[in-house]
Image: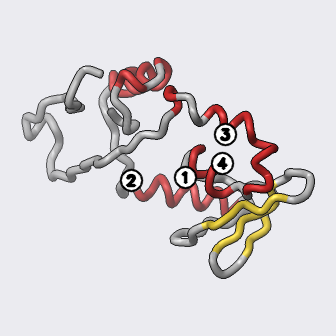
Amino acid sequence: GDYGEPPARGSFAINALLSYHFGNGAFYPVGGPAMIANNVVRVIENAGGKVLVRAPVTSILVDKNGKAYGVEMKRNRIHAPIIVSTIGAPQTFQKLIPEDQHHRIQKQLEGLKDPNVAPAISLMSLYVGIEGDAKELDLPKRNLWVFPSWE
């Protein structure tokens, strides 16, 4: 579906939210999907934050009390009071938290073994821009989600 999982693996909440959302039709951001990211970046920077792209993090920096205080990259370190990881829980906990800190996140590491929270792969989304509106072009009002089975 719209969140990279077959419906059987999605939570009731996300399925309900998507159904409600599409009940009134779908919408497209003026200026394209990049406008969403651009506006999020602007909010972060206006609040004094910094957004980096193509800057792979090798480790989250953790002090002796277990508080994260920054990230380490190949060429430098960045200290920050708040760190947001967008690579998912498995990668964050297993690859970015230093091994000597794993005793602090044992519960989270164990939780990652639960098959109900296994990571998934979203292979492709296709966005097509056309000139004219759906009514004028006599386009059907529907989304197609194609899966190899009902599971």
Between disc 3 and disc 2, the foreground one is: 3
Observer-nearest of 131 and 83: 83
Q: Amino acid at mark 1?
A: Ile
Q: Which quadrant of the view contains residue 148?
A: top left
Position in image of residue 122 (x %, y %): 35, 44
> What label does residue 33 carry, if any?
2
Which numbered disc flags the more N-terminal residue, 3 or 2?
2
**Alpha carbon of mark 2 to alpha carbon of mark 1: how far?**
20 Å
Q: Secondary structure at mark 4?
A: helix
Q: Secondary structure at mark 3?
A: helix
> What label does residue 93 carry, if any?
4
What residue is rendered at 57% in x and 45% in y?
90
Label 3 belongs to which residue? 109
Label 1 belongs to which residue? 87
Which numbered disc flags the more N-terminal residue, 4 or 1?
1
Which numbered disc flags the more N-terminal residue, 2 or 1?
2
